[in-house]
């Protein structure tokens, strides 16, 4: 009897395959500028960061190292990683008139984190069309800014690249090691980038729901939760950063970095100048991340919302309710497992990188500051954000490989990885056995 491959394993193998293909393409001599020798680890790191829409780079900068061909490869990898290779493949099948079977629809359902098989092909089409239209609109706005500083074709390239990177929450830029700091006071570019990041981060199903209903009352509960939670995090994060940093940042910088900290990784500030309290706020925003079925990472806004609702309901001895409905026990369990599993992995990654790099540091002061930088870097990698305190390039090959696994782990998601290796994940009682409850002494 022929065994069927788990759709979750297909997703994992698919991401790994795209990453390896991207690595090979970036290692081609015409992908890098003349005189630059790109190591396999750095090519793998860049490819992983692009496919996992993270934005961390282990080279001086994308602009200085890669040729036009290399930048096009990175752009394509970002698009594939943001949309998902399954979504792109199924869209191509529909364009070519190839029939989408039930197995393919189930694969789409799992890749887009849906609860039903209904309307999968329509959702794929809408996802691709919305992505292309929004990115084109964003590129036009970007062009108005970049044409003032660059030649026509350079401005076109910059506009398209940054639009794709922003909407897919990738955080890659062509502006050098200072990211968007050179445009920290440009309101149009800042607002357009925030708009693209937010749209890409709320999820395709929310965008589709808003376009379909155009009425708050008719929106699905999922869409309402995502929109309210996203607004709370953006505004709350901006206020926290402004209060903690005071005159060191403007309100525009506070809002921009509150938006991009959750998913994208563009910077209009230097994080090395931030206080520890402000850095903690950024890491919390990064860890929560974007929303389900989006290009962003993190544990997702809905997980944060579910945990919040459960904690407050537990304190009041009431069932966790949202919009006059009880949050299912399965949803709560998944949220708790996701948080515990992700934090456990993050702690292990922080430990390993510090253990590898510590012998290379000269004194205890350097080690203390380096520990903060590593914690920040690992949270950024897991949440596929791309924010950095500037240590990526100087890390050893082993630490870069750990960060590659961290980015892949964060992009695919802990739940998907657990599910891929469990046959009974969606079965309440796979063995038909009932056990006597044991009331554990907790706390």
Image (cartoon, rainbow, N blue to C red):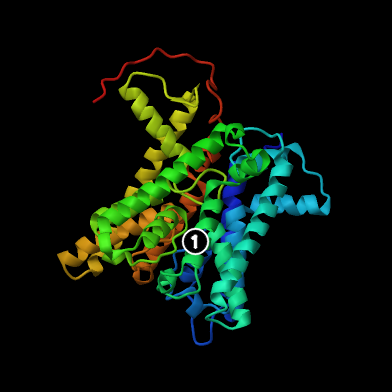
Q: Is residue 55 left or right of residue 394?
A: right
Count the numbered circles shown.
1
> Does residue 231 appear anywhere in the picture?
yes
Tell me if residue 318 comes above or below residue 28 in the rendering: above
| 176 vs 373, nearest the viewer | 176
* Residue depicted at x 62% and y 81%: 152
Q: Secondary structure at mark 1?
A: helix
Q: Residue furthest bottom?
A: 35
Question: How far from the left and from the top, in percent, is residue 390?
Answer: 34, 68
* Residue for badge 1: 191
Q: Residue furthest left?
A: 364
Tell me if residue 297 comes above or below residue 2 in the rendering: below
Disc 1 crowd, CA 10 A, few/some/many (<14, 14-19, 20+): some
> Does residue 23 appear anywhere in the picture?
no
Examine the image and state in which quarter residue 73 appears.
Answer: bottom right
* Residue depicted at x 47% and y 40%: 228
| 352 vs 60, nearest the viewer | 60
Q: Is residue 148 left or right of residue 315?
A: right
* Residue depicted at x 40% and y 30%: 309
Q: Quadrant of the C terminus?
A: top left
Q: Is residue 1 left or right of residue 287?
A: right
Question: How far from the left and from the top, in percent, is residue 108?
Answer: 66, 43
Tell me if residue 22 comes above or below residue 418 in the rendering: below
Question: How far from the left and from the top, in percent, is residue 41?
Answer: 46, 68
Question: How far from the left and from the top, in percent, is residue 146?
Answer: 55, 75
* Residue depicted at x 62% and y 53%: 83
Q: Quadrant of the N terminus?
A: top right
Examine the image and state in which quarter residue 435 appears.
Answer: top left
Q: Residue furthest right?
A: 97
| 424 vs 296, nearest the viewer | 296
């Amino acid at each position: 009897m022929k065994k069927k491959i788990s759709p979750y394993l297909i997703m994992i193998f698919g991401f790994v395959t795209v990453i390896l293909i991207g690595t090979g393409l970036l290692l081609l001599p015409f992908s890098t500028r003349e005189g630059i020798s790109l190591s396999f680890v750095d090519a793998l790191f860049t490819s992983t960061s692009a496919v996992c829409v993270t934005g961390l780079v282990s080279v001086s900068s994308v602009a200085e190292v890669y040729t036009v061909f290399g930048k096009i490869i990175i752009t394509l990898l970002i698009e594939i990683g943001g949309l998902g290779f399954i979504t792109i493949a199924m869209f191509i099948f529909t364009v070519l008139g190839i029939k989408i079977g039930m197995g393919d629809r189930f694969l789409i359902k799992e890749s887009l984190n849906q609860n039903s098989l209904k309307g999968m092909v329509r959702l794929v089409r809408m996802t691709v069309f919305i992505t292309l239209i929004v990115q084109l609109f964003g590129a036009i706005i970007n062009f108005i800014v970049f044409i003032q500083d660059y030649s026509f074709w350079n401005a076109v390239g910059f506009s398209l690249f940054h639009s794709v990177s922003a909407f897919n929450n990738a955080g890659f830029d062509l502006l050098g090691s200072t990211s968007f700091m050179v445009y920290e006071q440009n309101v149009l570019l800042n607002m357009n980038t925030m708009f693209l990041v937010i749209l890409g981060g709320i999820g395709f199903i929310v965008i589709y729901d808003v376009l379909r209903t155009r009425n708050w009352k008719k929106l699905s509960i999922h869409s309402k939760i995502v929109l309210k939670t996203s607004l709370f995090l953006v505004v709350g994060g901006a206020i926290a950063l402004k209060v903690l940093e005071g005159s060191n940042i403007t309100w525009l910088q506070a809002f921009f970095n509150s938006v991009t900290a959750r998913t994208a990784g563009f910077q209009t500030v230097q994080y090395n100048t931030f206080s520890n309290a402000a850095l903690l706020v950024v890491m919390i925003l990064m860890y929560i991340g974007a929303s389900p079925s989006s290009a962003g990472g993190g544990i997702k806004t809905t997980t944060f919302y579910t945990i919040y609702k459960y904690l407050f309901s537990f304190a009041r001895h009431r069932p966790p309710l949202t919009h006059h409905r009880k949050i299912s026990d399965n949803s709560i369990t998944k949220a708790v497992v996701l948080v515990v599993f992700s934090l456990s992995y993050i702690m292990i990654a922080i430990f390993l990188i510090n253990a590898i790099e510590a012998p290379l540091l000269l004194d205890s002061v350097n080690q203390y500051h380096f520990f903060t930088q590593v914690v920040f870097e690992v949270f950024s990698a897991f949440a596929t954000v791309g924010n950095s305190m500037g240590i990526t390039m100087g890390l050893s090959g082993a630490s870069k490989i750990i960060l590659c696994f961290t980015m892949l782990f964060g992009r695919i998601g802990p739940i998907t990885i657990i599910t891929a290796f469990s046959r009974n994940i969606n079965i309440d009682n796979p063995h038909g056995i009932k056990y006597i409850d044991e009331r554990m002494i907790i706390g």
